[in-house]
Image (cartoon, rainbow, N blue to C red):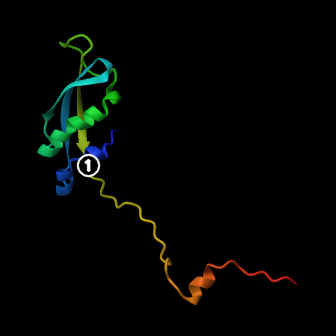
């Protein structure tokens, strides 16, 4: 799975849009992206437009993959689904409930135990 959070379109993220776009790309020598287009829409234009950016940013993932049938030497065609999904789990939060709290119980609980010599 390719995770590309920076490729999620802000407008789609704001609307909560999710979906899968099938993309067809032509990859040339040295893993150079020659062309890219959505071939099956997610139903959201912003996600469809962003799908090729995900492929371009992950082009080495597809090294050596794809079909060469009917293409010039060194060119391959790949078809890949790009799933745009919003992580709905809340980010982890560090909490320190006693931070900034004053009082004898709090101060005493943070002090190391006292040792008395016999």
Identify the image quadrant of residue 41. Answer: top left
Tell me residue 10's x, y (percent): 21, 51
How many circles with numbers are drawn on the protein? 1
Residue at (33%, 20%) from the top-left corner? 64
Tell me residue 59's x, y (percent): 30, 29
Mark 1, residue position? 85
Q: Is residue 20 visible?
A: yes
Q: Nearer the viewer, residue 77 or 35?
A: 35
The crowding category of the residue bearing disc 1, from other C-alpha atoms within 10 Å (few below 14, some 14 to 19, many at least 20), is: some
Identify the image quadrant of residue 73. Answer: top left
Q: Nearer the viewer, residue 82 or 101?
A: 101
Tell me residue 87's x, y (percent): 30, 54
Identify the image quadrant of residue 112. Answer: bottom right
Residue at (15%, 40%) from the top-left corner? 48
Residue at (46%, 70%) from the top-left corner? 95
Residue at (47%, 76%) from the top-left corner? 97
Q: Residue furthest right?
A: 118
Tell me residue 79's x, y (percent): 22, 28
Q: Quadrant of the C terminus?
A: bottom right
Q: Quadrant of the N terminus?
A: top left
Indicate whether 97 appears above or below 63: below
């Amino acid at each position: 799975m390719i995770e590309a959070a920076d490729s999620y379109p802000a407008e789609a993220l704001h609307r909560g849009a999710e979906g899968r776009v099938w993309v067809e790309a032509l990859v040339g020598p040295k893993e150079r992206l020659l062309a890219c287009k959505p071939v099956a829409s997610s139903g959201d234009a912003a996600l469809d437009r962003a799908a090729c950016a995900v492929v371009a940013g992950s082009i080495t993932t597809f090294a050596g993959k794809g079909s060469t049938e009917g293409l010039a030497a060194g060119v391959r065609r790949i078809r890949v689904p790009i799933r745009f999904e919003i992580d709905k789990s809340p980010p982890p939060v560090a909490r320190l409930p006693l931070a900034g709290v004053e009082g004898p119980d709090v101060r005493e609980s943070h002090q190391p135990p006292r040792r008395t010599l016999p």
